[in-house]
Image (cartoon, coloured by chain):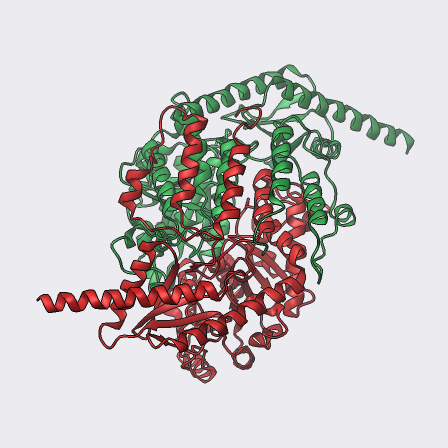
Chain colours: A green, B red
Amino acid sequence: MKSDSTVLPDVFRICFEHYNKAKNLPTGKIKNPNEILREFDFEIKKNPADAAELFKDMQLYLKLTPNTLTPNFQNQLFSGLNQYALAGDWLTSVTNTTMATFEVSPMGTLVEKKLIEHMNRLVGWENGDGTMATGGSNANMISLLVARNKMFPEIKKEGQLNKRLIIFVSEDAHYSFEKAANILGIGLDQVKKIKTNPNGEMEPSHLEEMARVSLSVGECPFFVAATAGTTVLGSFDPIDRIHEISKKFNLWLHVDGAWGGSVLLSSRHRHHLKGIENVDSMTWDTHKMIGTGLMSSFFLTKHNGILRSSHNHGGEDYIFHESEIAEWDSGPSSLQCGRRSDALKVWLTWRSLGDIGIEIQIDNLFAMAIKAKEMILEYKELELMYEPSSLNICFRYRSVSDVNTLNKKIRHRLLEEGIFFINIATRKKETFFRLIIVHPDLNETHLYKLFSDIIRLGNKIKEETEFCMLKT
Amino acid sequence: MKSDSTVLPDVFRICFEHYNKAKNLPTGKIKNPNEILREFDFEIKKNPADAAELFKDMQLYLKLTPNTLTPNFQNQLFSGLNQYALAGDWLTSVTNTTMATFEVSPMGTLVEKKLIEHMNRLVGWENGDGTMATGGSNANMISLLVARNKMFPEIKKEGQLNKRLIIFVSEDAHYSFEKAANILGIGLDQVKKIKTNPNGEMEPSHLEEMARVSLSVGECPFFVAATAGTTVLGSFDPIDRIHEISKKFNLWLHVDGAWGGSVLLSSRHRHHLKGIENVDSMTWDTHKMIGTGLMSSFFLTKHNGILRSSHNHGGEDYIFHESEIAEWDSGPSSLQCGRRSDALKVWLTWRSLGDIGIEIQIDNLFAMAIKAKEMILEYKELELMYEPSSLNICFRYRSVSDVNTLNKKIRHRLLEEGIFFINIATRKKETFFRLIIVHPDLNETHLYKLFSDIIRLGNKIKEETEFCMLKT
């Protein structure tokens, strides 16, 4: 380790240029692994590389990584990055501290605690609990773990034996609940899928029926997750009605608001989460709709102290010392021992926007989503697949034959051209584009260009196919 | 979101100054939560804060966070931060991409894969598998999960029923195995503690006995973890002998090398891990001994493809599309869906040092640890608790009465003075300082000052106590 840094000014320069330019640049052409392996030397050598060489590597890394900062990146449930989020993440890196104990990470601990208090108040919980997680999937897993340890406290000590634990999620829920059921030893088969209506919202009557059947065959149903913003359609499950059923059958009610949780800040749109104050816990990723940078995932719960009683075990011999500040240590309520401090970037972003700034940002996104829908309806070549519930706009290029394949091909060409990055999804055997309206700077010009390009490529592929058919 | 960043140059300036100065600064005085809550305004407001205000917050955040970059930070198993690690983390933040699919994170994916290949080769595995984890505890949990799903494949689907799964770790092992047993539904009681010898190394004969007893009472023992570098003493369990027993009883053999894994790079010290090529899996944190920044945790295994078969489930409808590059997606072999790309900082650090540079760094740390031990032996006021196995130097200030309390008090005063940050540990009812030799720039001057300060404070507290006793 050199005693002074010589490379950081150069690194800052390329990061800063990238940040300021990327918004107006395309997403970048995709390349396959073998192309990249030829273009970039990944090998770790016996001998040191010099600074100039490493600086070139960094530049090439930036060049070969898709640009997620542009409004043309519409592939994921996040796009863009608030400048304060980046600032906060840089500060987190340079302080390089770990979240296990208060004494080593006093600021990281308090910033996280205060953020969680603020978010809990927005949910409607005055005295809740929470922790940051390493992603929405991880936060969903924590909900299952906490619920299991609350409702079957003997499992923590004795393990899961002789009990078939059952969890309910809708057929449009995120797959992370199944991943969690695998991890927790509950088993994939014990994740029961509740039907959704044509808009992708959970059917409470089916939940009630499934819970009754499960009990009647001697299983232990204990958990239901409603989704606030489904991954593909952006639908919101009816929390109020699911809550009635969860009470009746004594189920822990979790809301997966990884995607849609942020609408709590909008007085115009928070009705999507009506009844949220009655649920037991919630997942909320602020890196999605608020642009706070990866990862900014939160697990929140109205049950104070439940994380520590669920997770705490060990470490007293060397790290969690008895003291008057021991209750402030976040390690005992975490799944980890050391963990990266992730709160600062969220906190700075939130302070910079204020609740009002986030509300405006979200309201603008919803307005732009309506605009996108209207534009699609005007193009005869395009077909709207679902009436949008929120910011997911599902549409496809029309075709009477091979419509799924054709749309997959259009997407592939789009990625090869490198202007837009947009995902496709398949639901009930139909494949379509899933356009995510989430970048705060996304405007009608971006949308116009995207739709034109999809139509251009669709027409072109159709022509090529017809030409091939003529030849044979 | 502003269209251009206006704050990043100022953020860089304070980060850069902090990085270059911190090495020569003290660790900082500790404050209790209430003091900090008075000094810093954590509240999130309705209205935006302006740039000047936020910049002050950032400066205060740096000031109130303990300095982990100085060689005087000896509290954790990491200290200091390579400049390329910081550079890599900054680039990761500005690219803000997620590791689920190859197409969105081609460079992140390949850098991680190539690093894991390199590390596996150092272990002795030509065709292994691996993933980055969110900490050493998480990597240890992955080992348990993968082993369970390999040895009891029905659990993934059906859940854990009617089987008492048993895991073995030494009584000096890290508490993360118990945390993992809680998460996985195996249960804390099923973590059986194997005795250690006076140096803190696992007694293989006791493991053999425990495995036999467990089988004889109808349990399902399936896993043993050896530790390469225990948390308190830095001891290495005898892998070769544990391997013989694991073969005999068909146990998955994992090595928790979170702390000590890096000695594989030193031809002088890698004998501590003799036999590592025979084990099934390994945890290795490069942020500890190599200084690559939090978090740089790896789970490695010799079993190719096992992560995907253990973890994979779902997501095909919207993210993991069938394609010729689908095998490159890292999501299906991860516990998460989206996750932060953590590999670049490790890769840049490793390239900058080369294997040789890391070897030199580690050999120097071992030499400095011997120096520390010799210095302690020379002070009549100090007592060496254990013959050091590696880089953990356990010692205390001597006292005929109340020695545990006295050493705790010394530590507390040390933290209040804010020059050194060093931890205490308690083992077999004895409390002592656990000095971690891990900062590459740590030298005899730092050690001399630390020991003098401990002796000064010890003498002072003794005097005060005697004075109090005289008075009563």
Q: Position of residue B240 (x, y in %)?
A: 56, 80
Q: Is residue B195 shown to the viewer in this render?
A: yes
Between A259 and B29, the one nearer to me in the picture: B29
Q: In the image as oriented, which residue stretches furthest toward the right?
A: A471
Q: Residue at left 57%, top 32%?
A: A79
Q: Residue at x 50, y 22 (%)?
A: A366
Q: Residue at x 62, y 47 (%)?
A: A6
The correct choice, above or below, for A308 with respect to A434 in the image is below
Q: Quadrant of residue A267?
A: top left
Q: Residue furthest left?
A: B472
Answer with left or right where residue A64 lies relative to residue A103. Answer: right
Q: Nearer the viewer, residue B386 or A147?
A: B386
Image side of residue B223 versus residue A251, left or right: right
Q: Position of residue B12 (x, y in %)?
A: 54, 38
Residue B164 in picture, x, y percent from top left: 41, 69
**Residue B376 falls in image quadrant:** bottom left
Looking at the rendered structure, the number of numbered marks drawn on it comes to: 0
Give x and y (percent) for residue A253: 36, 42
